[in-house]
Amino acid sequence: MSEERLRQLEEKIGYCFQDKMLLRQALTHSSYSNEQKINRFPDYERLEFLGDAVLELVSSDFIFRKNPKMPEGEMTKFRSSIVCEPALAFCARLIGLEQFVLLGKGEEATGGRKRDSIISDVMEAVIGAVYLDSGIEQARKLIEKFVLSDLEHKQLFYDAKTILQEEIQRENGGSLRYELIREEGPEHDKNFVVEVMVGDCRAGCGSGHSKKAAEQHAAYEALLRRKTIQAK
């Protein structure tokens, strides 16, 4: 990856690495590393391990301080919802991190760049790289800026299916179901389109690279529509 590309990512995250090799490693998937015959570069897996621990510490500290009356069980549930794989992938895409990942040809061809598991791992690896480069405070700034910001909005997205289900049951106990409308794209890179139905009414529509992701997007759209109607 060129120095220019690395600088572009540094601008996006608002942090300039002293050791650029740490950033490059954080972006290197094992499939890319394994393809290199000479000058083989280490992949992000060790940095991901470290970043996961840093993320858990910072998010736990944040939740503890911001919610002085929240019991332990609720804090654990809250933390899990904001650092789980889909949540981290969502945060990573807000930065456009998937554009910078170094993937092997096979992984690229099978849609790896769009896979939540990869993009969330890279997010953790970047956190680990920042921690090694400058310490916990710079890592904390990164996490608070991109993971722990605007949590009310993000929680609505992360927990959309559960929130929608609870709202419908609380209001009228009506039926809620998700219907697969169509599948698009080649077998290795499918895109699913799903509608969420409340009774016989179409409440929202969403798409994703798995049925689960498409359902989440559909529920999120339905919640946003409901909020708009309620605000009028």
Image: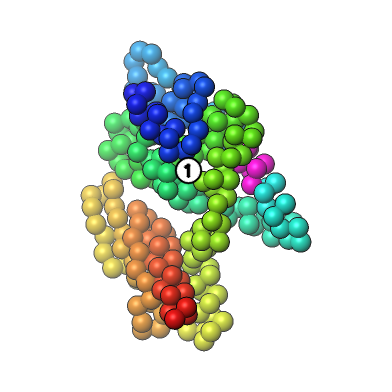
Inspect the magenta stretch and tell me whether residue 54 lies in it: yes
Whether residue 29 is visible to the viewer of this picture, yes or no, is no
> Residue 42, position in %: x, y?
46, 22
Which residue was labeled with disc 1? 120
What kind of element bears circle 1?
helix
Query: What amino acid type should be assigned to the residue bearing mark 1?
Result: Ser
- Compared with residue 122, is residue 77 higher up or lower down, i.e. above or below? below
Measuring 50% from the left and 33% from the top, which residue is drawn there? 15
Measuring 72% from the left and 52% from the top, which residue is drawn there? 65
> Residue 136, position in %: x, y?
64, 33
Q: How many marks?
A: 1
Whether residue 54 is visible to the viewer of this picture, yes or no, is yes
**What range of the chain is rendered magenta?**
52-59
> Residue 55, position in %: x, y?
60, 41
Quadrant where the C terminus sits is bottom left
Which of the 4 image quadrants contains residue 104?
top left
On the picture, is 55 further left or further right than 229?
right
Measuring 73% from the left and 61% from the top, which residue is drawn there? 70
On the picture, is 215 further left or further right than 131?
left
Inspect the magenta stretch and tell me whether residue 117 lies in it: no
Quadrant where the N terminus sits is top left
Nearest the eye: 216 or 179: 216
Which of the 4 image quadrants contains residue 208?
bottom left
Mostly what secondary structure, the magenta segment?
helix
- Compared with residue 151, is residue 59 higher up or lower down, i.e. above or below? above
> Residue 172, position in %: x, y?
52, 86
